[in-house]
């Protein structure tokens, strides 16, 4: 009976009023609304990855400024707010302007303006987009006697697809700059301005005249403004966890652990609570399956191409130490792929060194890690995804039985069937191939692990065993194990609490597969 009364999960629904009126699950973020609208500032910008709740939060602000007090009954803000003033709200959804040219973009902006001009009127002679926005703001102010609220969701959507196109980017950017230009001149008529996006605005020069925007993206008080914290999940969605656990035959704690491994791990400042991906978590509760939802909802083709352009190996995607200026930077000017990875949600903050003001960035969770590795298989292993999936499953079965010999036999047979690809005549290629495959197995894997006497090619840790692996090309597996012994690599890991196994692997550059291997228990 209890399970039948659970609220539905609003997967893909981004309108606050619809969620409340139709009794969907709503993770209460209204404390952030109150803090923001009662702060000292007037102009704000928030950056978060796609499908992370930016649009829902913007919609919540819209309902608040429209004075719709009834929608907030029982939420945190209902006990904080004493005045519910209705303001004229201009809401611009720029997500509609993806994959457009200049004429289409101007037409779409004009259409959105026209909807509000029907309500508030339009000054004679206001024909250009910027003049029409200026006119609209002034007319709304004069008609209502109240200052105007401007909300722009996904302001950068028209630019993302042309971020690195020398011709199209400046053209579309000029359209956007001219459109937003009146915001500064209209300051006396504005109550509140809020913009969301993925990329940062200041360096894009779209808001070059509006130099008083407060970027709250990395402000600690707003760390959980989007996404779902573990406390919110356990406190507000526990019934869904119980239902999911029952359907999957798991205990409550096992279900939480699997959800955490798959969807948790995001931080957009430091310190910060752990943030779950809201789209994936709600999808899992809605479909009662723990699968990859967020990664599968967007094709990272452009990302993969940028990784190749900057020469980033699969193992180099995470474990990045960087200053905020390196990842909180515009993607159009980037000289590394770090900013794109961070702003797109493929890496996130994992630690902070206050002394040197540097951040540790890494892949947030298994959904992103496995999704990325699946996307990289065609570039490093094979374009036959069905064959790759079958191989990974067979290798996983062997690894979980502690059958390293069987796993390597499976790998050798698989590589023998892979068509020739470039860059296989060096040891590092096979190191990356193993890293991708082991990551797809969901097993902790690291490469080039430092020890007092050198670096271990690969360290792989299962629940029962830690493997220390050394790779050779056109030599012998015996040589590989001898190097492990000579440099005493296993002593670096004696405190791990697991049995340590040495694995030497030799690859044949002519056959492009595993030639031989040697496995020894320490």
Image: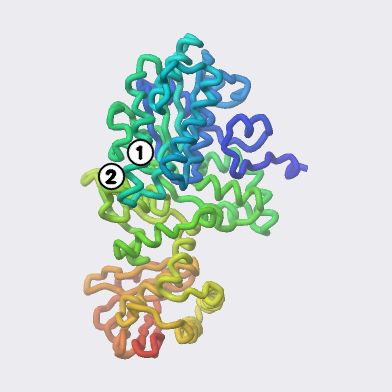
Q: Is residue 348 above or below residue 380?
A: above
Say which of 104 and 319 sits in front: 104
Horizontal side, residue 237 vs residue 52: left or right: right
Category of crowding for the residue at label 2, using alpha-carbon neighbours closer than 10 angstroms: few (below 14), some (14–19), many (at least 20)? some
| SS at circle 1 | loop
Q: Is residue 478 above or below residue 166?
A: below
Say which of 465 and 130 sits in front: 130
Number of on-image labels: 2
Which residue is the site of mark 1? Answer: 218
Q: Is residue 337 above or below residue 210?
A: below
Give the distance between the C-alpha atoms of the residues marked 2 and 1, in whole angstroms.
9 Å
Horizontal side, residue 287 vs residue 80: left or right: right
Mark 2 or mark 1, earlier in chain: 1
Query: Residue 84 at what x, y percent from top left?
Result: 54, 15
Q: Residue farthest to the front?
A: 125
Q: Quadrant of the C terminus?
A: bottom left
Q: Which numbered circle lies on residue 341?
A: none
Category of crowding for the residue at label 1, using alpha-carbon neighbours closer than 10 angstroms: few (below 14), some (14–19), many (at least 20)? some
Quarter location, residue 23: top right
Residue placed at 50% from the left, 69% from the top?
Answer: 441
Query: Residue 443 at what x, y percent from top left?
Result: 46, 67
Say which of 378 and 462 sits in front: 378
Residue placed at 50% from the left, 33% from the top?
Answer: 57
Query: Residue 292 at what x, y percent from top left?
Result: 55, 57
Residue placed at 39% from the left, 44% from the top?
Answer: 159
Q: Quadrant of the N terminus?
A: top right
> Pointer 2 and pointer 1: residues touching (CB < 8 Å)?
yes
Query: Residue 21 at what x, y percent from top left?
Result: 67, 29
Colouring convention used in this rendered image of the protein: rainbow
| SS at circle 2 | helix
Residue placed at 41% from the left, 50% from the top?
Answer: 161
Which residue is the site of mark 2? Answer: 324
């Amino acid at each position: 009976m209890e399970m039948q009364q659970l609220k539905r999960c609003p997967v893909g629904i981004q309108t606050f009023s619809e969620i409340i009126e139709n009794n969907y699950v709503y993770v209460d973020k209204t404390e952030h609304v109150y803090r923001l609208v009662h702060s000292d500032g007037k102009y704000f910008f928030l950056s978060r990855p796609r499908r992370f709740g930016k649009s829902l939060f913007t919609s919540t602000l819209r309902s608040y400024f429209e004075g719709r007090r009834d929608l907030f009954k029982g939420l945190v803000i209902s006990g904080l707010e004493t005045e519910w003033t209705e303001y004229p709200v201009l809401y611009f959804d720029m997500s509609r302007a993806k994959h457009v040219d200049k004429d289409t973009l101007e037409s779409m902006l004009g259409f959105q303006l026209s909807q509000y001009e029907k309500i508030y009127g339009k000054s004679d002679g206001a024909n250009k987009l910027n003049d029409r926005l200026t006119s609209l703001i002034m007319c709304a102010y004069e008609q209502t006697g109240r200052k105007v609220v401007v909300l722009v969701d996904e302001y950068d959507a028209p630019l993302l697809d042309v971020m690195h196109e020398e011709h199209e980017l400046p053209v579309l950017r000029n359209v956007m700059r001219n459109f937003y230009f009146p915001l500064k001149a209209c300051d006396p008529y504005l109550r509140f301005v809020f913009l969301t996006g993925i990329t940062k605005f200041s360096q894009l020069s779209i808001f070059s005249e509006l130099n008083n925007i407060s970027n709250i993206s990395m402000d600690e008080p707003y760390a959980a403004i989007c996404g779902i914290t573990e406390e919110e999940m356990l406190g507000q969605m526990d019934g869904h966890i119980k239902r999911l656990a029952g359907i999957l035959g798991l205990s409550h704690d096992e279900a939480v652990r699997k959800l955490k491994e798959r969807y948790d791990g995001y931080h957009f400042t430091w310190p910060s609570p752990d943030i779950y991906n809201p789209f994936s978590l709600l999808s899992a509760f809605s479909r009662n399956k723990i699968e990859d939802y967020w990664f599968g909802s967007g094709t990272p083709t452009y990302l993969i191409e940028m990784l190749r352009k900057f020469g980033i190996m699969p193992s180099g995607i995470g474990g990045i130490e960087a200053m905020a200026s390196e990842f909180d930077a515009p993607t159009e000017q980037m000289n590394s792929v770090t900013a794109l990875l961070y702003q797109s949600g493929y890496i996130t903050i994992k630690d902070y060194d206050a002394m040197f003001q540097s951040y540790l960035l890494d892949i947030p969770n298994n959904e992103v890690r496995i999704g990325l590795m699946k996307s990289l298989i065609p570039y490093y292993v094979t374009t036959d995804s069905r064959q790759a999936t079958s191989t990974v499953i067979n290798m996983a079965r062997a690894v979980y039985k502690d059958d390293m010999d069987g796993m390597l036999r499976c790998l050798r047979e698989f590589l023998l069937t892979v068509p020739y690809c470039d860059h296989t005549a060096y040891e590092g290629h096979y190191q990356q191939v193993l890293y991708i495959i082991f990551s797809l197995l969901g097993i902790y894997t690291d490469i080039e692990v430092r020890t007092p006497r050198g670096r271990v090619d690969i360290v792989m840790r299962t629940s029962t065993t830690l493997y220390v692996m050394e790779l050779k090309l056109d030599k012998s597996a015996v040589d590989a194990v001898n190097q492990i012994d000579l440099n005493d690599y296993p002593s670096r890991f004696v405190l791990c609490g697991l049995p340590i196994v040495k694995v030497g692997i030799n690859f044949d550059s002519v056959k492009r597969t595993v030639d031989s291997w040697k496995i020894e228990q320490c």
